[in-house]
Amino acid sequence: MNPSDEYKLTDLDYLIGDHHLQMIKAALPYLNVPEQRAVSLFVKFQELRRTFELFETEEVAAMGICSLDQGQHPGSIRDLLKAIRPYGNPAEQDLIDMAQNFMDGQTPMEQLRRFLTPEQQSRFETMQMVISALQAMA
């Protein structure tokens, strides 16, 4: 991943991490490869340990951040797509948008038109009119 790539943290990431672990992660490039491996494993182990502790101690208030409200059993596919979209790369976001549009009743042809330039859209509409006219004459 490039440093310029935007990387978003989830609520769970905030619960299991802290600024000390982030500082250790930031120091990794300044270590030799064997030390990077060992320190990376240490950081991941700490995050795993904290994840187990969240469920062990039954911190309902803290885990409530990661779960849906009780009134939203179990949540819709649309809500799920909306929740995961910000974490995807641009191609994945386009795919999620396409899935949402499909669920909203857009035909594949309507979805395809979104990816066309204005000039291509104009040509496409012209071809649709020609085809419709030919079908009407038949």
Image (tube, rainbow, N blue to C red):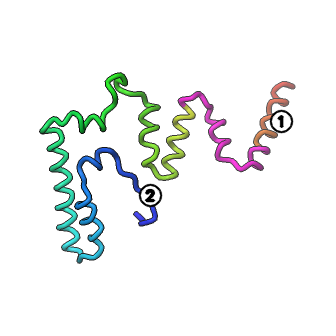
Residue labelled with disc 2: 6
Q: Residue at x 17, y 56 (%)?
A: 45
User: Which residue is at the far left?
Assistant: 56
Residue 7: quadrant of the picture: bottom left
At label 2, the amino acid type is Glu
Front one among 117 and 82: 82
Q: Is residue 80 left or right of residue 115?
A: left
- Helix, strand or loop status at disc 2: loop
Q: Residues within 10 Å of mark 1 (few under 14, many from 20)?
A: few
- Give me the disc on residue 130: 1
Q: Is residue 86 left or right of residue 73?
A: right
Viewer-proximal residue among 28 and 59: 59
The three-letter code of the residue at mark 1 reads: Val
Q: Secondary structure at mark 1?
A: helix
Is 76 covered by the magenta stretch?
A: no
Can you tell which of label 2 and label 1 is closer to the viewer?
2
Q: What range is drawn magenta here?
A: 103-123
Give the quadrant of the N terminus.
bottom left
Q: How many marks?
A: 2
Secondary structure of the magenta portion, mostly?
Answer: helix
Q: Position of residue 56 (x, y in %)?
A: 12, 39
Q: Is residue 38 above or below residue 13?
A: below
Q: Nearer the viewer, residue 112 or 86?
A: 86
